[in-house]
Each structure stands twice: as C-alpha cells, then as structure tokens.
Amino acid sequence: MGHELVLIEEEYRSKYIGCCASPGVGITLKVHGSIKNLQQFARANRCTLTDHIDFAHNLREVAIKNKVPKAHYASLSCRERDAERDES
C-alpha cells in the first residue's frame, strides 16, 4: 500500500479464561503519503485505523525502550474487538 511496516502485533488465546485477549493482528506503519488506501482497507475488513499515533510513547507503555524517528505513524487493528465494535 506504499507505507513502511514498523511493527506487527498478534493476539490469540488457546483457551478462554474470562477476559482480555482479542484474537487478531495489528500493525503500525510509517505513513508515506495519503492514508486513503488504509481507510478503505479498514472499512472493508472491519478494522480500526488510528492515524497520527505517538509510536515512541506506545512502545514505552509496554516497557520497550527504543529510539523512534519522528514521522507520521498510523496503527491498523484487525482484532475480534474491532469487528464487534463495528456491529454496535
């Protein structure tokens, strides 16, 4: 789609224990140009697109210390909870 992949996330559960895991995947992208193609993909696949995220802050929240270049980042989440949110 013309953007640079910088992070892949995966959530799964092998057994339901009562909370938290939402099976699916998420990606963080360094955006190059328009996000129109990401918006279309998100709508078509019942995903959640979050534009202009603070990628460095998101990494620090999960105890990852890494220098991240300043750039335009977006996150695309295609998890069970995203599809359910679309149904409400």
Image (tube, helix red, strand yellow):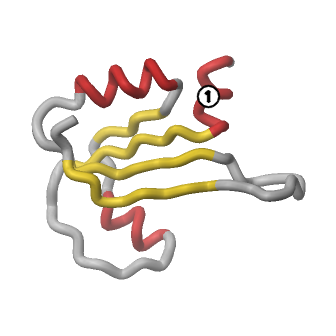
- 66 versus 13 height, above or below: below
- Location of the N terminus (image quadrant): top left
Left or right position of 69 against 54: left
Q: Return the x and y of residue 63 as percentages of the image width and height.
A: 48, 78
- 61 versus 21 height, above or below: below
Q: Nearer the viewer, residue 41 or 57?
A: 41
Please give the residue where the numbered disc 1 appears in the rendered image: 83
Q: Nearer the viewer, residue 21 or 57?
A: 21
Residue found farthest to the right: 17
Residue drawn at point x = 68 percent, y = 55 percent: 12
| Circle 1 SS class | helix
Residue drawn at point x = 59 percent, y = 45 percent: 24
Q: Residues within 10 Å of mark 1 (few under 14, many from 20)?
A: some
Left or right position of 3 against 48: left
Q: Nearer the viewer, residue 5 or 67?
A: 5
- 76 versus 15 height, above or below: above
Q: Return the x and y of residue 25 as percentages of the image width and height.
A: 52, 48
Residue found farthest to the left: 33
Amino acid type, residue under disc 1 in the picture = Ala
Residue drawn at point x = 68 percent, y = 47 percent: 22
Q: Quadrant of residue 74?
A: top left
Residue found farthest to the front: 14
